[in-house]
Image (tube, grey):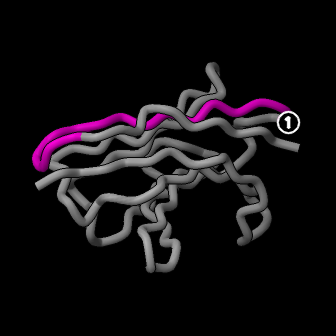
Amino acid sequence: QVQLVESGGGLVQAGGSLRLSCAGSGRTFSSFDMGWFRQAPGREREKVAEIYWSGGTSTYYVDSVKGRFTISRDNDKNTVYLQMNSLKPEDTAVYYCAAKSRYTSTYDYWGQGTQVTVSS
């Protein structure tokens, strides 16, 4: 089992920044791929960013956040981050942290979510 707890959400004006954190516990954190997802009201959940167990440049970003968001991980602290810059109102959503084995394609472990609201 992996337990995930997100923090860092809040209300910010358009153009501002937020950093989300996701603290993991349980099984070996460094062996998991980690992802950030978001879900806005009335919309499907989408994967925003992903960082693979090997870290470094092994990352993925959805096109709408490329150049604005950065995912990173600190395996010593069992934490993954999402730095969000140049925020837009359309970034408003509940953001979820998730983890999966590097041998599978399905995210099995989820945090409770943190609300991000960007005002215009």
The question of residue 74 being in magenta is answered with no
Residue 46 placement, left or right of 4 = left
Q: Which SS class for mark 1?
A: loop
For the residue pair 70 and 4, the one nearer the viewer reads as 4
Task: Identify the residue at the far right of this view.
Answer: 1
The residue at the point 73 percent across, 36 percent down is 29
| Residue 80 vertical position relative to residue 43 in the rendered view, above or below | above
Residue 78 placement, left or right of 47 = right
| Residue 100 vertical position relative to residue 15 in the rendered view, above or below | below
For the residue pair 3 and 31, the one nearer the viewer reads as 3
Span shown in magenta? 12-27
For the residue pair 93 and 100, the one nearer the viewer reads as 93
The question of residue 18 being in magenta is answered with yes
Residue 54 placement, left or right of 15 = right
The residue at the point 20 percent across, 60 percent down is 89
Residue under label 1, please give it. 27
The residue at the point 48 percent across, 53 percent down is 95
Residue 117, percent across and down?
Answer: 31, 50
Q: Amino acid at mark 1?
A: Arg
The residue at the point 84 percent across, 32 percent down is 26
Residue 60, percent across and down?
Answer: 44, 62
Badge 1: residue crowd in 10 Å (few <14, some 14–19, many ≥20): few
| Residue 78 vertical position relative to residue 113 in the rendered view, above or below | above
Quadrant of the image containing the C terminus? bottom left
Residue 1, percent across and down?
Answer: 89, 44
